[in-house]
Image (cartoon, rainbow, N blue to C red):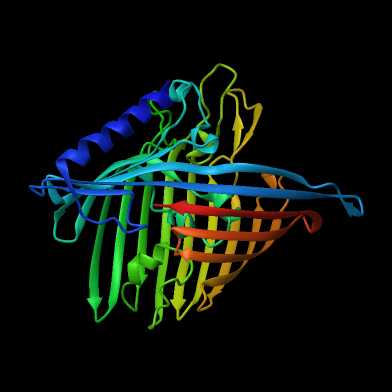
Amino acid sequence: MYVRYLCIAVFLCFSYTSKAQEISDTKFGKGLINFVAKDSSFSVKFAPRIQGRYNVNWDHNGDTYGTGESNFLIRRSRLKFSGFAYSTKLKYKIELGLSNRDLSGANQFNRNTPRYILDAVVMWNFYENFVLWAGQTKLPGNVERVVSSANMQLIDRSLLNSRFNIDRDVGIQLRHHANLGGDFMIREKLAISQGEGRNVTEGNEGGHQYTARLEFLPFGKFASKGDYSQGDLKREQNAKLMVGLTYDLNQDAVKTRSNLGSYMFLSDGSLYETDITTFFADAMFKYKGFAFMGEYALRDAADAVAVEVDGTPTGDIVLTGSALNTQASYLFKNNYEVTGRYTTTNFEDITGRAPEDQYTLGVSKYVVGHKLKIQADVSYSTADGNEDGIMLRTGFDLHF
């Protein structure tokens, strides 16, 4: 039923805009439909995207690797809308997810319904370089997470991101940028959000989440916002660098991974609450086809072990610890790219989880940048220093 209504809404959007708008850009990669009202009072850009994947995993079994387990999947299938309303200073973004991975996560806090909405945010440039965001979108966390999944140079994000990122939430953000002299820029991002992730509709369990991020760009802006797109597809002729620092406090958090993970229920049906802090330091560097991204994450909790009123452990434990991720690549003139990544995680003893190491080597062919590409990578993973598994992945991206 929900999909039917969604298809009807998209059809109406097509029908209406085709009559009331003027086509402003039909080039591939700039949106399937890109209209501006005749009186310039609003605009609508519609850009669907698909990511297809094929994965094979071999788990270590004694002295050999077992038979590989494989699967085909549509990792992401999304509809993206963006533009401005009333004034170019009032912009919006809507992104809907239709794949199983995007829709999963139904529970009593979102009325047990599919989670279609990824982004639904309004951005108001109300004064000079100040922009106020309101709605649901990504928090200003580690750079790898904020980079769109459409703009990655490997099949998917790292173990650091899957263990420690702070993802999307509902709330408000204040963003500002300034020039400190010459090309040196600084950007500040502040957010106050609900603290339980996207599409929560049943109240605010626990407290709120507070996020602050500072970004330093000593050599000026990247071409085409390349600081939030992996790989040096623009082949920066002058070295570009972004260094970012993020501090996040989720006050009275009720999930095992800040605003992600599972809810920490007590036997009486209430929720265990504890303060969870997450720190990120990251950097993005690009120069003449070479790109480097590095990240460090650190998570702590006031009381990581969830306990009942009488002090009995419930079995839920906040995933605390640290991780380091480094990623380097080179883009050849024929638009083939080779990428290497190393990720290591180290969890606190209380979690009972072994440290992880993962080595990944990937190859990408960019047909039309990130908008149309074919990729493949192979990863070797270890847990606690023991052989664990090999993973081979390949896939394509099509993004209008």
131 over 215 or under it: above or below: above
Above or below, 225 relative to 20: below
From the viewer's perspective, is 383 left or right of 118?
A: right
User: In the shown orientation, is residue 321 left or right of residue 333?
Assistant: right
Q: Where is residue 300 shown, x and y percent of the image?
A: 54, 49
Residue at position x 42%, y 57% in the image: 246
- Residue 193 position within the rendered picture, expressed as x and y whole percent measured from the top left: 35, 40
Which quadrant is the N terminus positioned in? top left
Number of marks in the rendered image:
0
Quadrant of the rendered image containing residue 267? top right
Please name the residue shown 33% across and 48% down the image. Answer: 191
Q: Examine the rendering and report whether any part of residue 169 can be seen.
A: yes
Residue 31 location, x and y as percent?
33, 52
| Residue reaching furthest to the right | 63
Residue drawn at (55%, 71%) of the image: 336
* Outermost residue to the left: 39
Q: Nearer the viewer, residue 82 or 140?
A: 82
Q: Residue 277, image x and y in percent?
A: 48, 48
Residue 156 visible in the current orientation: no
- Quadrant in the picture for residue 396: bottom right
